[in-house]
Amino acid sequence: MFKSLQTRILLYSLLIASVPLLILGIISYGSQRSLLEKEARNALNAGSLNIVNETYSYLNERISDVKLMSANSAIINPGYSRKEKSDELKKFIDAKGNYYGVLYLDMEGNVIADTSNKMIGDNLAKRIWFKEAIEGHEFLSDVYKTRAFSEPIIALSAPVYDNSGEMIGVVSTAFRLEGLWEMMEKKANEISDKYPVNFYMINQEGIMISKKDPHGMMQDSALKEMGLTKDKLMGASLTDELYSEENGEKIYSIQPVHTVAQTENKWFVVVGADKKQVFQPLNDLLTRYLTIYSIVFVSIILAVYLLTKTLVRPVQELVEATEDFIGGKEFIISDKRSFEEMEKLNLAFLRMMETIEDREKEIVRTEKLKYVGQLAAGVAHEIRNPLTTIKGFFQLLKSQDHDKSLIEKYSDVMLHEVDRVNVFVTQLLDLAKPHQLEWEKINLKEFLAEIIDIYTPSIPSSHVRIINYVTQSVFVYSDRNRLRQVLLNVLNNACEAIEARGQIELHHDSISQYIRLVISDDGKGISPENLKNIGMPFYTTKPDGNGLGVATCIQIMEELKGKFQIESVRDEGTKVTLTIPTTNRLIK
């Protein structure tokens, strides 16, 4: 995939350029994220602490009001009537404006004075705020509803002592939650410049005051909504780290609320923000960074592509020139200007190609001389033996009387030797002289059947069986006589290779514009040493052979625009493959 020089240079350049940019972006993104998380933590914690402090002041101010009411002269003086006590309490809450009403109860929990006049005579001894006040504590209750008021309240209670210091009753106020919420909202708005925040106060049970539903208490636990438990709530309130919802959409700062009075449950201020809004600047930064990275990346690709094209072009031209040289064309170096090293390489290649051409010419000349020597030695060997025989018989005839029967006997031998020379010369001419080919379309199935029918009676061994698997009509373009000569030679060699019982098989398959005819035998095969030399003129392993048969077959198949290939394994057999054209378009 990355084998080409241009691809590798492009890849390495992109890695070198983009990896540092990517690492820098990751580091920058991480540092920006850490900074934004720190800012969000500081902002939310500061906001929640600010609200906690204001809540602390607000509640303690209400507790101070209750303590002040518990010391009112009209309340501690038994000489004042119930109405006078109620009027005095009403004056007090009218002056403060933060209360729905005030109750005064005796030691048994009976309501003696009520600014609303709705609960006179009721016994509230079971209320937790009454029990705590009887114990001598100022007490802050949870949010709850009463029949006296339509809105939920928080009750503040304190014990009442007479002038002698003896406890004589309990005073309890129901203060308005709107005031507490308005105070919290005002402080929360101070931290919402960057992003909106949610804020509320909850107890450890998760009950909270809701601005959306100011006339009722949210009985569904807010802990479940935030994925908190009581223990997690307590743990989150003891650390400065922000708490994240299980779904990860919101983050919260949770701070405990402390008061000088005792409380029914622990109370907490929760300030939350949408995580998407908190990290929106980070997302904007990431978008900008990705945009810049994409622009830089594309620019690098274009720049490196142009650079690699400039660098690789001379190399490609050199490769093309080398391939042309291999194909037989002249090696020509490019005249285009390139970098110095490439020009030196071109010149070095030119000198190398010139050297190769000189060496090739020398090798061809040497091979020609070697071939001529082998040819001369082979011709001399094949002709000298018959001539020696003929010469000997002539000498015999010259030295003896002219006996007719002897002359006939010697003449037969001499004629046989002359025939041997004639056959050899004919084979030599077949190898050397090109023939005028007669091309025609041949049905290979019928052609093979005809050859097998002709050849079978002349098989040297009766134990050889020829099996023809070419049972379908396939057509080839060839010269019938020359192709027959090759097939007969191959069949004859296969028969001679089978020393005992065996068989010869003919198969075929098709490739693009060719038929491959495979003739295989299960004879003795050819050793690797001999297989290397098969096809060389005058090379033979047969006692009476001259080594021209296979060489002639190779020459004929080249004339027929095909191929002659031979494969063999010692003691396993030999396979000859003839590749024959199926179309006249290959014939020129």
Image (cartoon, grey):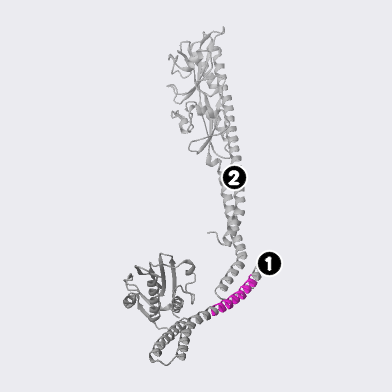
> In this rendering, which labeled residue sits more in front, label 2 or label 1?
1
For the question of whether residue 134 can be seen, the reply is yes
For the question of whether residue 202 can be seen, the reply is no
Residue drawn at x 47%, y 72% as measured from the top left? 534
Q: Quadrant of residue 470?
A: bottom left
Of helix, strand and loop, which one carries label 2?
helix
Residue on which the image places disc 2 = 29
Residue on which the image places disc 1 = 340
Q: Residue furthest right?
A: 340
Q: Which quadrant: the C terminus? A: bottom left
Q: Do labels 2 and 1 touch, CB within 8 Å?
A: no
Query: Does the magenta segment cover residue 436?
Result: no
Disc 2 crowd, CA 10 A, few/some/many (<14, 14-19, 20+):
some
Separation of marks 2 and 1 at Cα, in angstroms:
45 Å
Q: Which residues are magenta?
A: 349-372
Residue 460 shown left or right of residue 123 in the figure: left
Of helix, strand and loop, which one carries label 1?
helix
Q: Where does the image place residue 466, in percent across and percent down from the top left?
A: 33, 71
Q: Is residue 290 above or below residue 135?
A: below
Return the residue nearer the eye: 396 or 359: 396
Return the residue nearer the eye: 574 or 178: 574
Residue drawn at x 66%, y 71% as measured from the top left? 347
Q: Is residue 58 above or below residue 248?
A: above
Residue 207 shown left or right of residue 15 in the figure: left
Return the residue nearer the eye: 2 or 212: 2
What amino acid type is highlighted by mark number 1?
Glu
Q: Where does the image place residue 396, in percent across and percent down from the top left?
A: 46, 88
Q: Which mark is residue 199?
A: none
